[in-house]
Structure formats: structure tokens, C-alpha cells
Amino acid sequence: MGLTYEEFAPGAVHEMPGRVVTEADISAFAELTGDYNPLHVDAAYAAACGYGSIITHGPMIVGIAFGLASPLLNGTVIGLLDIAWSFKRAVWPGDTVSARVAVRDKRPSRQADRGVVELALEIFNQRREVVQTATAKVLVRRQHSQGLG
């Protein structure tokens, strides 16, 4: 179970374990989204553009980052309210991405059973280089609402 509104402490930092990104992941994302940009599916094209080989889709890493952060939110998040994302570096097949999730702020919602939590995310590769940064506002259940469906 993820954290409730009361359990999110402004200033708290959560280090989320990493995950390896594979060529199969990139192919599956291209198939799922229909994004067949040659940077992601054509090694010769990506190499000619200076990347050496194919790179991941930036939005794929956004999704992976939310997956890495999901232990904090599973079963308590009600909705994603706002998101701002920056792309700093490419991610290649074989890279391991991990996330740092910092609680920036929180405030009660107009509805008593929930609150708004603002998170700052940094996504790293295996060399601890920042590849993406983000802020997100999420709507989270309060402790007394856990019995609700």
C-alpha cells in the first residue's frame, strides 16, 4: 500500500530502485504508441545522428519513472493533477534508470477524504547522471478514507 496524505512529509526524499531498459522495451513502446521515429528503431539512422545506436523514447522513461515511484502511490493515489517534465539526456538500451522522489509540498483538498501532494522527480542513469526531471501534483487519499472503494 502506498503512502496516505498524512504520511507524505514535505522535505522527505525517497530513493527508488532502478530498472534496466532493453531493446525489447523500446520495440514494445514503439508498437504500443505507433511512434516509429528512426531514432528509436533504426540503429544506422540513430548512429548517423550521433547517438551511436537507438535511444529510448523520452515519454517511455516518463512511464518508467511513474512505475518506479508507484510503491509510494499504489492504492492511495486518486489522480494525477499536473505534470511538468524536462528531458536532459538520452537513455540507451542497457541503461539502468532509477528515480529520486522528493516531497515538495502538500495541502488539503476541498474534499475531506483527500489531499494534494507535490512531488519533484529526478531520473538517473546508472552513472547517476540526471536524464529527466519533473514535478507532479497528485491527489492522494487521507488515512480515514482507506476503507472506501
Image (cartoon, rainbow, N blue to C red):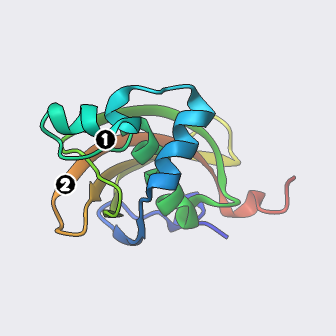
Image-based side of 138 in relation to 75, left or right: left
Tell me the element at label 1: helix
Identify which residue, 122 or 115, lies in the foreground. 122
x and y percentages locating residue 26 in the rendered image: 47, 46
Mark closer to the chain start, 2 or 1: 1
Image-based side of 124 in relation to 9, left or right: left
Q: Is residue 31 visible?
A: yes
Identify residue type, mark 2.
Val
Query: Which residue occupies 34% across, 41% down?
Result: 135
The dot on residue 80 is none
Identify which residue, 43 or 70, lies in the foreground. 43
Tell me the element at label 2: strand
Quote the CA–CA distance across marks 2 and 1: 24 Å
- Residue situated furthest front in the rendering: 44
Q: Please tell me whether residue 143 is drawn above or below residue 148 in the rendered image.
A: below
x and y percentages locating residue 70 in the rendered image: 56, 60
Q: Is residue 108 visible?
A: no
Query: Which residue occupies 35% across, 56% down?
Result: 93
The dot on residue 130 is 2
Query: On the image, numbered disc 1 is attached to which residue?
Result: 43
x and y percentages locating residue 19 in the rendered image: 43, 68
Identify which residue, 107 or 43, lies in the foreground. 43
Query: Which residue occupies 65% across, 61% down?
Result: 74
Query: Which residue occupies 74% across, 62% down?
Result: 144
> Which of the two marks, 2 or 1, is nearer to us in this view?
1
Q: Quadrant of residue 34?
A: top right
Quadrant containing the N terminus in the rendered view: bottom right
Identify residue type, mark 1.
Ala
